[in-house]
Image (cartoon, rainbow, N blue to C red):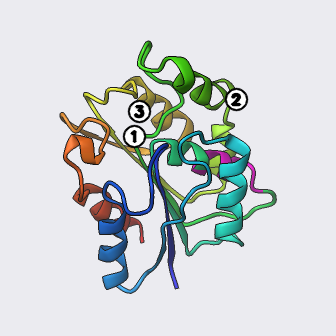
Amino acid sequence: MKRVFIVHKWEGAPNSDWYGWLQAQLERKGFEVHVPEMPNSLAPKIDEWVEYLKEQIGTPEGDTYLVGHSMGCQAILRYLSGISGEARIGGALLVAGFVNVRKGVFDGLQSEIIRPWLKTKIDLGRAKKHSKRFVSIFSDNDPYIPLSDSKTFERELGSKIIIIPKAGHFSEDSGYKELHVALNELLKML
């Protein structure tokens, strides 16, 4: 059975944004779907998130698919880059994924929280080896993520890139309680 893991954003939860909607849509089609509550969501730490994701997934295999949103994409890419051997998942769908953030949007405590995520390099080439395919969805007016990261994902991951006009950060604040483009792309992948 194909398994899908949806990894929420920083300050997210399994029932926020469009995660529950996507889970329900996929379960109706017979897929096994997990939306784990990532640890310490208000102040995420790389090691905690990657280790927790590793525990949740167990053995990565061709019937495993990962969906991430924002910080969840970072966790997925770091997880994939840490897989040993030749294991490959079926695919990864990255929504508002990033390796950079816009200047000046985070300050104080937020800046301290996100700094390790930006300064600790992800081996994207290694991550690419452990997923059969990538699809990345960006917005042209994301308040946090520069659109230039789409070029990085395309070049380093070989990702298919989809740019949605004026979609913000694909969160409830941007009007997203459903994300049909993610469902459609995931179903093509599955």
Q: Position of residue 85 (x, y in %)?
A: 81, 60
Q: Are marks 2 and 3 in contact (CB under 8 Å)?
A: no
Q: Position of residue 22 (x, y in %)?
A: 33, 67
Q: Is residue 83 above or below residue 166?
A: below
The 10 Å Cα crowd at callout 3, few under 14, some 14 to 19, many 20 or more, is many
Classify residue 41 as left or right of residue 130.
Answer: left
Number of the label disc, if any, that sits on residue 120: 2
Q: Position of residue 178 (x, y in %)?
A: 23, 59
Q: Which residue is mark 3?
A: 150
Residue visible at 66% across and 45% down in the picture: 78
Q: Which residues are magenta?
A: 76-83
Q: Is residue 24 above or below residue 181?
A: below
The residue lying furthest to the right in this view is 85
In space, the residues marked 1 and 3 are separated at their CA atoms by: 9 Å
The 10 Å Cα crowd at callout 2, few under 14, some 14 to 19, many 20 or more, is few
Query: Could you tell which of marks 2 and 3 lies nearer the N-terminus?
Result: 2
In space, the residues marked 2 and 3 are separated at their CA atoms by: 19 Å
Q: Which residue is mark 1?
A: 96
Instruction: Provide the major secondary structure of the magenta segment.
Output: helix
Residue visible at 56% across and 59% down in the picture: 132
